[in-house]
Amino acid sequence: MNEQRLSERLERVAAHVPAGARLADIGSDHGYLLVALVKRGAIAAAVAGEVALTPFHAAQRSVRENGLSQRISVRLANGLAAIEPADGVTAISLCGMGGETIRDILDRDQARLSGEERLILQPNGGEQPLRHWLMEHGYRILGEEVLRENRFNYEIIVAERSEPVRYSAQELYFGPLQLQERSSAFLAKWQRLLRLKQCTLSHFARARQAVPEEKVQALTQQIGWISELLAQEGAKR
Ligand SMILES: C[S@@+](CC[C@H](N)C(=O)[O-])C[C@H]1O[C@@H](n2cnc3c(N)ncnc32)[C@H](O)[C@@H]1O
């Protein structure tokens, strides 16, 4: 992967960025997403935010080497602190971090969100708490995807501020739109996870030290939900 050729994961993220957006990519690492989008003429301007020095320097280098310093500001900052009101940001991407980390970044500096931005989130795990935060803060989920690349499952969640929305516990767990669509990538992900969770539950049963009851209950409930979902699909065939 480089700024000419994005990974499939980042291509799918790019597909959810509105044309002509002013995009802030928080945790930009090398900055490939922003450089590729500006070079394609897909976005008007961008901010790359990085908390760590090595990726910050890598992003500065990519932007400089591609002659895009006028269009992409690279900033060393923690989370949304990279965004200034004058940037007029219309979309924010947070990709390749745990869902809880993305949630905490959004939660910490809410004053930096105008409420007009589209959020394009690509959590690596922790989707449920992230969806919960979105719901509690008035965001509606407008797009969701599951994809598999290099033997990993990735999810993309696209959200915008709206009137209050309530999602059920299962919708928060599986994703409200994915639960409706039930793509083959989504079903394959949950088939794999069901096997893993069943295995974990049987390890819990054999563990020498007692596993906290709420942990066992949560896992049992998840296995129930996944089994029900997959049984419904099996019954349709
Ligand atoms: C695994 S990389 C993902 C890079 C890129 N977004 C992608 O999806 O390919 C995560 C990046 O997020 C950065 N990061 C983690 N927490 C951050 C925070 N609070 N603020 C800004 N950047 C952060 C890390 O330094 C790292 O470069």
Image: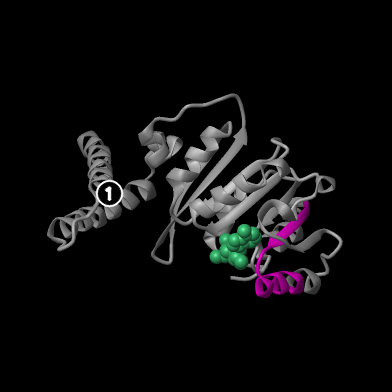
Residue type marked 1: Lys
Q: How many marks?
A: 1
Q: Which residues are magenta?
A: 44-61
Screen quadrant of the N terminus: bottom right
Residue 136 higher or lower than 1, as above or below? above
Residue 6 appears in the figure:
no
Return the residue nearer the eye: 183 or 81.
81
User: Where is mark 1, residue-wise?
Assistant: 215
Residue 188 place in picture, x, y as percent = 32, 51
* Residue 37 locus on image (x, y percent): 71, 57
Residue under the image location 56 percent in, 50 percent down: 104
Ligand 1 sits in quadrant: bottom right
The reply to whether the magenta stretch includes residue 154 is no
Residue placed at 41% from the left, 37% from the top? 181
Left or right: 152 in relation to 231:
right
Picture residue at 66% right of the left edge, 75% below the top: 54
The quadrant holding residue 55 is bottom right
Left or right for 128, reference 158: left
Q: Nearer the viewer, residue 199 or 76?
A: 76
Q: How is the image coloured?
A: one colour
Please state which of residues 122 and 86 is positioned toward the viewer in this rendering.
Answer: 86
Q: Looking at the picture, how far across and down is residue 223, in whole percent?
A: 24, 45
Confirm whether residue 132 shows in the render.
yes
Please tell me which residue lies in front, 68 or 24: 24
Residue 67 lies in quadrant: bottom right
In this rendering, the answer to whether 27 lies above or below 165 is below
| Crowd around label 1: few <14 · some 14–19 · many ≥20 (10 Å) | few
Q: Quadrant of the C terminus?
A: top left
At a point 37% along the width and 40% down the height, the residue shown is 182
Q: Position of residue 208 (x, y in %)?
A: 15, 63
Q: Secondary structure beneath disc 1? A: helix
On screen, 62 above or below 199?
below
